Amino acid sequence: MGSWLVAMVERQIDAGINGLVPVGTTGESPTLSAEEDQRVIELTVETVRRRGVADTTPVIAGTGTNSTATTVERTRRACEHGVDGVLVVTPYYNKPGQEGLVRHFSAAADASSVPVVLYNVPSRTACDLLPPAVERLSEHPRIVGVKEATGQVARTKEILERCGDDFLVLSGDDATCRELMLAGAQGVISVTANAAPRLMRELCDAALEGDSSGALLVDQQLGPLHRDLFVEANPIPVKWAVARLGLIPPGIRLPLTPLETRHHAVVLAAMKHAQIILRQRKVRITLQQIF
């Protein structure tokens, strides 16, 4: 795991991304052992520090589970490994009410020594953290933002109105992140960026600068990836794509299974549309010439 994980982190840094989120959903965190979870965090933090980009590339570790006690423990351990922040997802399967969500996140924030970002993704968790609850949680001194993966522009605007400009709102949906950033969101925690980090950086730069036409051009190049990296449940397609680029070995852990053969051409076509296959080949030629 170590060598290819470090290589992936290095690639993201070289592409100019503004942060790393190890052990999130795309990192298959539900199937990692406690030891693997901590090792992924350690390697990410170590690589960022070795590259001397700790001031510009925060490491925000995913620590959320559907158990408040386990979330508290994972949050404490991540803090001990030197992360810059933690990302805490809404408790999946349990389906708590808004009061339960507020208490859950508050307990995690009480246990944290670093900033906490809430993560709302109701399509996967069967529970929705609503704006009034986000507003309550924004009053906690360590809760600094939310990754909002509903893709709803109106929801983004409501959260900003309720919580103020100092509260960080990040898109969690690549397909609508351009619209959310143009509406006031401050960035995106991206699936697409695992395969196309430089283009996602270009998209974010344009959108955050208010360059709607420039952002649209990049987004059109990435549009098929945004869509087709979800032809099966994330992270099945993106792990296939990154393996196809030669960046990681093939494979995925049960209960997920490898991308079905009938979807290979679809994802490959999206990669070619974004021109990341061509870019990767050029990098390989350069490396062969150097070594």
Image (cartoon, rainbow, N blue to C red):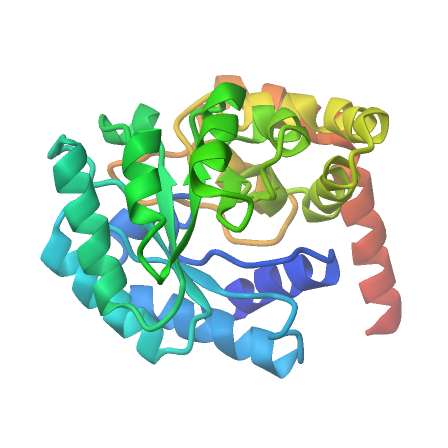
Nearer the observer, 154 or 235:
154
Frontmost residue, 175 versus 262: 175
Task: Give the number of callouts.
Answer: 0
Residue 172 visible in rendering: no
Give coordinates of residue 275: x percent, y percent.
Answer: 79, 34
Who's the residue at 56% across and 75% down the image?
A: 47
Which quadrant, please, contains the C terminus? bottom right
Q: Residue at x 81, y 55 (%)?
A: 283
Relative image position of residue 101 (x, y in whole percent): 19, 41
Q: Quadrant of residue 234?
A: top left
Q: Is residue 242 above or below residue 268?
A: below
For residue 256, say whether it is visible: yes
- Dividing the picture into quadrants, the one containing residue 108 is bottom left
Residue at horizontal 59 percent and vertical 59 percent from the top:
8
**Within the image, what quadrant is residue 221 found in?**
top right
In the rendered image, the quadrant that contains the N terminus is bottom left
Q: Is residue 128 left or right of residue 167?
A: left
Q: Is residue 79 left or right of residue 212?
A: left
Left/right of residue 77 with respect to residue 217 in the rendered view: left
Q: Position of residue 72 (x, y in %)?
A: 19, 62
Image coordinates of residue 79 in percent, x first then y, are 34, 74
